[in-house]
Amino acid sequence: MEHDARDLALDRPRRLLHHPAPGRILLPAALALITGRVPQRLRSRLAPTRPRGWALFALYLAAPLNAVRRLAGASPGLTLAATAAAGTLAVTGCVGAALAAHRATRAAA
């Protein structure tokens, strides 16, 4: 049976659903770092995994705060409050990531 490029493109989403390693759970990066489920080969580069995970999670939370309220048609006051909260979370995430990196370099020295 011959397949053209269109048939293969339509089959691609079904092929992506099959996980190559059955029985394993693929977590988002932030949750994997928070729970400590990091591959051994990456553990030395991501030395303080939990602080880096919380920093990444704070950055992840800024996106829904900016998007969901606009999709819901929130009032301008609620939009301003959510934007301020998202900005605070983003800054917290960046500072947390910087502190984790600083601690890792200080501990290695």
Image (cartoon, grey):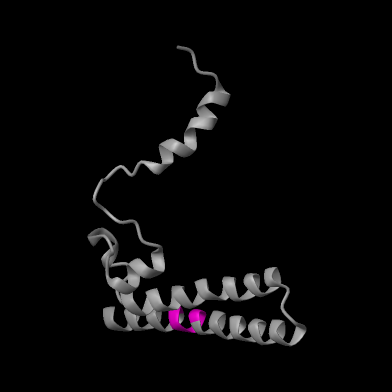
Residue at x 40%, y 64% (from the top left corner): 29
Q: Position of residue 6 (x, y in %)?
A: 58, 25
In magenta stretch: residue 19: no
List the single residue furthest toward the right.
Answer: 76
Q: Is residue 66 above or below residue 107?
A: above
Q: Is residue 18 above or below residue 66?
A: above
Residue 5 sits in quarter: top right
In this rendering, position of residue 93 left or right of residue 35: right
In this rendering, position of residue 55 left or right of residue 21: right
Residue 94, can we see it? yes
Q: Is residue 21 above or below residue 106?
A: above
From the viewer's side, name the closer residue of 82 and 42: 82
Residue at x 40%, y 69% (from the top left corner): 30
Residue 109, can we see it? no
From the viewer's side, name the closer residue of 25 and 46: 25
Give the mark count.
0
Q: Say which quadrant the C terminus sits in.
A: bottom left
Residue at x 30%, y 42% (from the top left corner): 20
In this rendering, position of residue 104 left or right of residue 65: left
Q: Say which quadrant the N terminus sits in.
A: top left
From the viewer's side, name the closer residue of 77 and 38: 77
In magenta stretch: residue 95: yes
- The dominant secondary structure in magenta is helix
Q: Is residue 71 above or below residue 51?
A: above
Residue at x 68%, y 71% (from the top left corner): 72
Q: Position of residue 76 (x, y in %)?
A: 76, 83
The magenta segment = 93-97
Q: Position of residue 106 (x, y in %)?
A: 32, 83
